[in-house]
Image (tube, grey):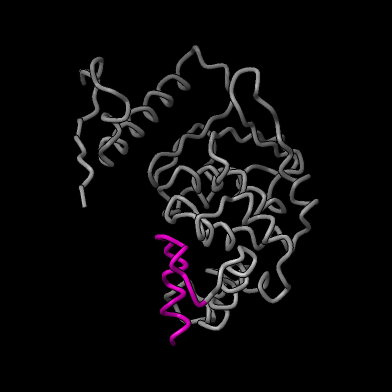
Amino acid sequence: MNETVTTYYHVKETTLIRNISLKVFLSDIQTKAELIEYLADKVLRYNRSSNNRLKKFIVTSGTQTRGNVDIPDSLLTHSQEEADTLLILNAVSVPHEAELVVSSPDTDVLLLLVHIYLHLPVSTVFLAGKGRLKRNISVCNIGNDLVQKLASELLGLHALTGSDMSDRFAGRTKDWCFQAFMSCEDEILDALAMLGNDNSLPSGNGNLPVAQKVAIVTSLLKKASLDPQDLKTTGRCPTCLSFQSWSRD
């Protein structure tokens, strides 16, 4: 197996990047962290200058949040480092009567927003697309259309069917998995909602009893017209491979 080669660049004013591709420059995780800190510091300096037209601003980088207003406790004591979850952490600190626009090219952020839509301002919109294709998507409208029960189960579905940390489920697209999700039985939906959220369950393996994990995967496999007893066609899907050991327990 070929290991990914990364190159570390110390980020400072004099760092020469003109002849370096963005992919190579951001290949090392430490370079990314330093770049975020560098940009955050520049934003703070600009917003504190006389050129600033913003009355209030908050900048979060790593686990540190700074600004010219009182920082909410949720941003002072957090341990989040991923950009997606930092956006959500900032979003839930916005007053409910405010107008909130969340801009991101990542649909994972939209899914997270819908999952917590009851904790966001009613006017929350997700800004998607580029140029002429930009559009505002009402987060609360999606949440209301799904109803609270289905919205609360989105994270479990997302974790099992492909995310930043996992591959596709049995090679199926997110669209296919979502359609299957919409037609799942209540017991499967309830199990998805418990995934990672039930502190009364023992830790490890997603915090779900083996029987429930097997039921979720079996249900999705059957909807994919795959035999739960023959997982050769599922490729390297980690959830499907794990299913083999779960079903033997």
Q: Residue at x 53, y 30 (%)?
A: 57
Locate residue 132, reporting x and y percent: 65, 18
In which quadrant is the C terminus drawn?
Answer: bottom left
Observer-nearest of 180 and 209: 180
Residue 154, image x, y percentages: 63, 58
Residue 104 counted in the magenta span: no
Magenta extent: 229-249
- The image quadrant of residue 141 is top right
Q: Residue furthest top?
A: 51
Q: Is 139 located above or below residue 167 in the figure?
A: above
What is the residue that sits farthest to the bottom in this orientation? 249
Instruction: Return the x and y of residue 230 as percentages of the image width and height.
Output: 48, 73
Residue 245 colored in magenta in the image:
yes
| Up/down of 145 relative to 102, above or below | below
Query: In this image, 63 relative to 183: left or right?
Result: left
Q: Give the camera-side residue of 142 and 97.
A: 142
Q: Is residue 31 above or below residue 207?
A: above
Q: Is residue 73 above or below residue 91?
A: below
Q: Residue at x 60, y 46 (%)?
A: 93
